[in-house]
Image (spheres, rainbow, N blue to C red):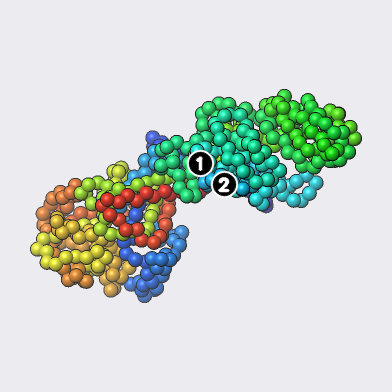
Amino acid sequence: MPAIITDRFRIHNSEQFQEAFSETSGNTMYLGIGRPQAFATSTRADGRTNNEGSDTAPVTPADNLNAQHFPYDDLLACKKIAASDVTFAIPRRNWITGTTYDIYRHDYGDRITGTTTAQTANSGVSNLHDSTFYVLTAARNVYKCLDNDGNTASTVEPTGTSTSVLTTADGYKWKYMYTLTASQQSNFLSTDFMAVATDSTVSSAAVAGAIDIIKIKTAGSGGTNGTHTNIDIRGDGTGGKCSVTVAGNVVTAVTVTTAGTGYTFGTVSNAQIVAAGATSLSGAELDVIIPPQVGHGKNAIEELGGFYVMMNTSLEGTESGNSKDFSVANDFRKITLVRDPQSGGSAASATTLRATKAINLTSVSGTFTVDEEINQASTGAVGKVVEWDSTNSILYYIQTRHNDEGVDANGNQTAFSGTNAVTGQSSSATGTPTTSTSTINSQSFTSGYSASEIDADSGDILYIENRAPITRAADQTENIKLVIEF
């Protein structure tokens, strides 16, 4: 049974997701970074091969139950995403001279009258929001293309912020939509996407069902030359009028003289043109282009296809001073979006969360090195070093479900505990967990141990991205723009 999910449904979903960041009883979202160890093919404790690709070509994450558990194993830290870090977005399409842009049409995908052929854009697509019908200019203004002068190349960049339709010298007609603010340019403008927002002045000037453009579908023949005026635009709206120019006995131009209001469909027939003075004209067909439901510019998010949500998060060094929430001693290869995680059994609310485990050691001999395996022979615990803080004798580590990262040769995952010595397998460094309970760099240690600040498996993993390693530094900021398409 033929059916579709409409773009309005996609926009509805994007609105619901965006609202989750600001609602009183909304969701709490965290951006997580993880995976300090390299992607590789390894043998699991159960004997099966674990193929993760490589650092240069990591595999695409699978969408299964493991995806709700495994990311917690090598999670390093999380940062809360504030409502101000979120915006609706659309694909970025820069205005480039010499490009033939698609036009806004209300009927892409519909069958052309009398045929089995779908109405398509100049670019060949049959969906408005797949077409290139809007542009971003050098002035960071966004315009919608209403007419492309008969599918010719655009050579004059549109300018200005008038609420009226703008006609450029190359014959294009543009509708100004909004301007990216300095903040939007800084936070929500990437190579491929940009923020979308409604300009209040443009929105206030929008007229529901006002006709701006009528296209010539078939020029006809035999008509009396001249400009024939005061032709009604018929349909369910009122007040619309146009003039039709006939030259060489064919229709060559149509100009809307009064936009009218309230049109959801409209027609101008060959007979109307004849009655206006184009005697003997036959076969002419015109397409009345219907504006968005509430008028051009009323709601830029709906009009331009804002079913994308962009989240912008910056990771600045260690983020929380000396608390080591965001270690700069190791790299990361995985980005996650976590919804409603818990911390210490309660809903997480802190701006940053350390996801590694930590041990405060005493009687240390040698220097632990990042990424090396650590063992506690008396308990069988296995882990991997994320960072060794030699100043405070704190060992940060992770434990995963794989050999050399978290489970012993028999496949058992055991927690580090007690005052049993911890040994680095590459460095041969050793240390004994302290028996004291203390606070070091805002981190609480109970008998030498400090748990992860994010409870494993406590939230929903909404997004996973495997990527090439990113090396961190104390004076470095990583700006992560995550775009979700609905």
Image disc number at residue 74: none
Q: Is residue 294 above or below residue 116?
A: above
Give the residue type that dot 1 points to: Ala
Hey, which quadrant is residue 299 in on the image? top right
Q: Give the image location of residue 156, x and y in percent.
A: 60, 40
- How many discs mark residues in the rendered view? 2
- Mark 2 is surrounded, within 10 Å at the Cα level, by few (under 14), some (14 to 19) or many (20 or more) other residues, namely some
Q: Nearer the viewer, residue 156 or 357?
A: 156
Q: Give the image location of residue 64, x and y in percent.
A: 45, 60
Residue positioned 76% across, 36% down in the render: 253
Helix or strand or loop: what does disc 2 sit on?
loop
Q: Is residue 252 above or below residue 124?
A: above
The numbered mark, 2 or 1, whose residue comes first in the sequence reads 2
Residue positioned 66% across, 29% down in the render: 210
Residue positioned 30% across, 70% down in the render: 403
Q: From the viewer's perspective, tell me whether residue 458 is left or right of residue 419.
A: right
Q: CA distance from mark 2 to mark 1?
A: 10 Å
Image disc number at residue 96: 2
